Image (spheres, rainbow, N blue to C red):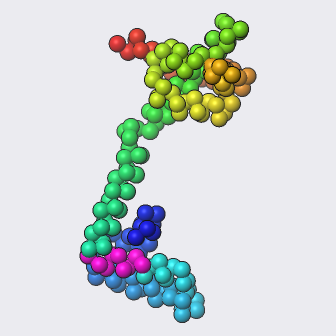
Amino acid sequence: MTEEITIDYYEVLQVSPSAEPETIHRVYRLLAQRFHPDNIETGDERRFHQLANIYAVLSDPEKRAKYDVAYHHRRQDRLRLVSTSGQAENDFEAEQITRLTVLEALYTKRRIDPAKPGFYWLELEELIGRPREHLEFTLWFLKQKKFVTSDDSSNLILTVEGAEYLEQNYRISQPQKRLQTSKEDK
């Protein structure tokens, strides 16, 4: 049953997960006829064998019960992944604000102290009021876009692209609520 990890048996058979055994049998027979290798017009040996393997699992009550447990577990995992925050729009907006806040901090540091233009992770965490785990995605994104880089001492430093991006997007994002520091959260 290694195929079950990547294939939704019910979707392949085009039946509901709550389908009765008779329905599964009827649909299997119909699809097996269509994809049987002897069928000149629509034969597909690979698909036929896949259907036969799926039917072997779904037609056996014990195997189907095992498959259903794994099937429902995978569906719950997918739903949990999609609904982790309730509203994805809020997560996207919060992430955009976090990115701009990091860029603002690095921009200001570069302007004020050109000899030491960067922050260590810990300094950035304290300045922004967010733990490292919450900043990892943000910094990964900013590095991939080449808005931020690290120097030889692992300081995070703003790049020219990052400065230009911030300047272009600052006016657009200015009316948005900025992230609060940990002192403001209290």
Q: Which residue is at a point 58% across and 18% down the rendered structure image?
A: 120
In percent of width and height, residue 164 lies at 71, 22
Secondary structure mostly seen in magenta is helix
Q: Say if residue 36 shows up in the picture.
A: yes
In percent of width and height, residue 56 lies at 36, 80
In percent of width and height, residue 44 lies at 55, 83
In percent of width and height, residue 58 lies at 33, 75
Outermost residue on the right side: it is 160
- The stretch of residues the image draws in magenta is 53-61
Q: Quadrant of residue 173?
A: top right
Image quarter (top left, top right, bottom left or bottom right) of the C terminus: top left
Q: Which residue is at a point 67% across and 7% down the rendered structure image?
A: 113
Is residue 57 covered in magenta?
Answer: yes
Is residue 150 covered in magenta?
Answer: no
- On the picture, is 144 further left or further right than 179? right
Image quarter (top left, top right, bottom left or bottom right) of the N terminus: bottom left
Q: Is residue 14 above or below residue 40?
A: above
Q: Say if residue 111 shows up in the picture.
A: no
